[in-house]
Structures are given as C-alpha cells and as structure tokens.
Image: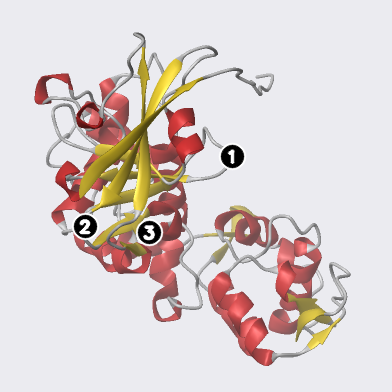
Amino acid sequence: MNCCIECFQDTEIRAMISAKDQTGECSFCGSKDVLIYPVDKQTDLSDLISAVISTYEESDVGKPLFQVLLNDWSIFNPLVTCSNKLLEAFCLIIFGDSENSHNVKVRIPRSSTENYGILGGHTWQEFSTNIKNENRFHNGFFKADRLATFLTYAAKRYAKDTLLYRARIWSDNKGFCTKEMGVPPFDKRRSGRVNPEGICALYLSSKEETAISEVRANAFDFVSVGKFRLLKNISIINLSKLNNISPAIYSAGLESLTANISIFRDISEEISKPLRRNDSHLDYLPTQYITEFIKSKGYAGIEFSSTRATSGDNIAVFDESLFKCESVHNFEIEKIEHTYKKL
C-alpha cells in the first residue's frame, strides 16, 4: 500500500515523500500519478509517527489516538477524508497485528506538561483566569525559558521594502492623509490582543482587502487604506507557524513539543479572534503577556491569521518607525455579506 504527498499537510513530511521521487496511485485518497510513499513496511515516516505516538500514555479518560493525532497535529491533510484509514495503516506497522490500536485512548502524561510545558502543567484557560483575576504581573505559571526555545522555529524574516496595509474608517469627505494612518497618540491607544493600553503597536495586514475587513466597516462606510513600506530587514514571530512546528524538525524534543502543542494552538486562536464590542480589557491580558515576552526577546512583532478575511495575515509591529506610509487610497464599502451559525 502507498500513501501520497497530498495525504499530508506537514511541509517536512511532504518534502520527505518528494525526496523519495516515486510516483503512482495512492491507496487511500485514490490520486493517480502523484508522489507516493509506502505504508506497508517500516520507514522513516512510520518511525516518525511512532515517535509522536510514544509521547502519549494510555488512559481510560483520554481520547482515541486517531482523534488526538488528527486534531492536535498538522501532520495529515484535513481536506483528505481518508486520514483515519491512513493512520490505522501506520499503526498496523507500528504495533503489529492490533487492528484497533488507532482507537486506544491516550493523553499527554502529566509529568510531560509539568516538566516541559510553557505553563508548567496548566492549561491556557487556567493561565488566562489566573492572570486576569489573581496574579497579573508576576504570574508563576509562565515558564519563559521554555517558550524561548520554540520561538526560533516560528521566526519569520521580513525584507526591507515589504509592503503592508492599514485601514481606517472616516466620516467626512476627505479621508486620511499618510501622516494620519499610523498608530494613535498615546492618550488614545486602546488595549488590543497584542498591546496594553497606551503601548504602541502598529497593526498591519498583508493585503488591502484584509486590512479593510479588519476594521469591521459597514455597508456605505468610507475607508482609507494606507500602503506602508518596511524601512529595514526585521524578524517577527509567526504564531501560526508556532502552532504548526513539524515533529520532523523537532524530533529530538518531541515530549516537549507534545506538551505544548495544544497551548500553541490556543494562543494562535486567541490572538486571531476579532475584537468584540462587549470585550473587557481584561480579556486581552493573556495574549498581551505572551506578546510582551516576544517583544522582550528582540523580535520586531508578531504575525497571525485573519479570521475576518478569507485570505491574508495580520502583522502587529512593536515599533511604528520601522514602516513609512507612502500612499493612501480611499474606498466606499458597497456591500457586506454575513455568514452565521445557530448556537
């Protein structure tokens, strides 16, 4: 049996399959004339998946192994419906003839989260409650040195002259000029998921349409979009990348990665949430705590996915002088389309 490159999302695993340079038909998703990889014998890929599985322990209160690996890791392609069968095939190689091995209930050992977790064995929710209601500035949950070791895997370089965008809604018939498109003055800087009140953070987007979506403009609003040019090379932390560190490049510390995988996902999801009208400034404290630490390590900002646009990323820069607004275009919003779900 063979799987194929399209069965996987992890870029390192896809590179592993590509390096084998064999084409054929996938036994799982049915793709033809694609790069394939064997799953009916022990391979480097089966060894890697076995190493990931070994970081968990069996537990009656855990979740099925296939559910844990599919939900917690970005190994398999979420758009491919055969991932469960593929994992079952790998488990047959790893565990032998036990056909139900992929259904065994597992959990992350408590010792792993305590010894390697960036929150010292606590969940993101427990950390958030503690920092909002109990210990704001000297939070004993956070283990700074443990997070620092992961940041290099999520670092991203932005080259000089990179163009990014920022939008502002206006109500008169003039719009904003380039000098008005930067961060507000000190007395008007409100709390956000990246910056505490009064602290500078220049929020930018990778695309013009993403920037417009982020300001939550309504139909018939007028919006100014500034084009910002980066004045020097910088390094930022891509939180989406932190949430998708490949086990193939962190194989020497898989226990540590497993202990933090759900926390990294929670951080990435929390910081990507759009601001709501009824939010309290306390709601932003947990992510502000993390971003202030990233800032203290010398990184110029953070990047995170936009949840308000179908594509594009958001970038929050700690020093607005790194960018210069070189032009502004004005727009009128013609139509807003809402999607919704029943609660």
**Residue 50 appears in the figure:** no
Q: Residue at x 41, y 50 (%)?
A: 263
Amino acid type at image mark 1: Thr
Alpha carbon distance from label 3 to label 1: 34 Å
Q: Earlier in the sequence, mark 3 or mark 1?
A: 3
**Residue 45 appears in the figure:** yes
Numbered tag placed on residue 333 in the rendering: none
Residue 169 sits in quarter: top left
Taking depth in this image into account, of 177 and 45 the one nearest to the observer is 177
Numbered tag placed on residue 299 in the rendering: 2
Percent position of residue 277, x then y:
39, 15
Closest to the camera, between mark 1 and mark 2, is 1
Percent position of residue 7, x then y:
73, 68
**Residue at which label 3 appears:** 113
SS label for mark 3:
helix
Q: Residue at x 39, y 64 (%)?
A: 112
Alpha carbon distance from label 2 to label 3: 26 Å
Q: Is residue 265 left or right of residue 97?
A: left
Q: Residue at x 49, y 61 (%)?
A: 244
Q: Earlier in the sequence, mark 2 or mark 3?
A: 3
As drawn, 176 above or below 248: above
Amino acid type at image mark 3: Thr
SS label for mark 1:
loop
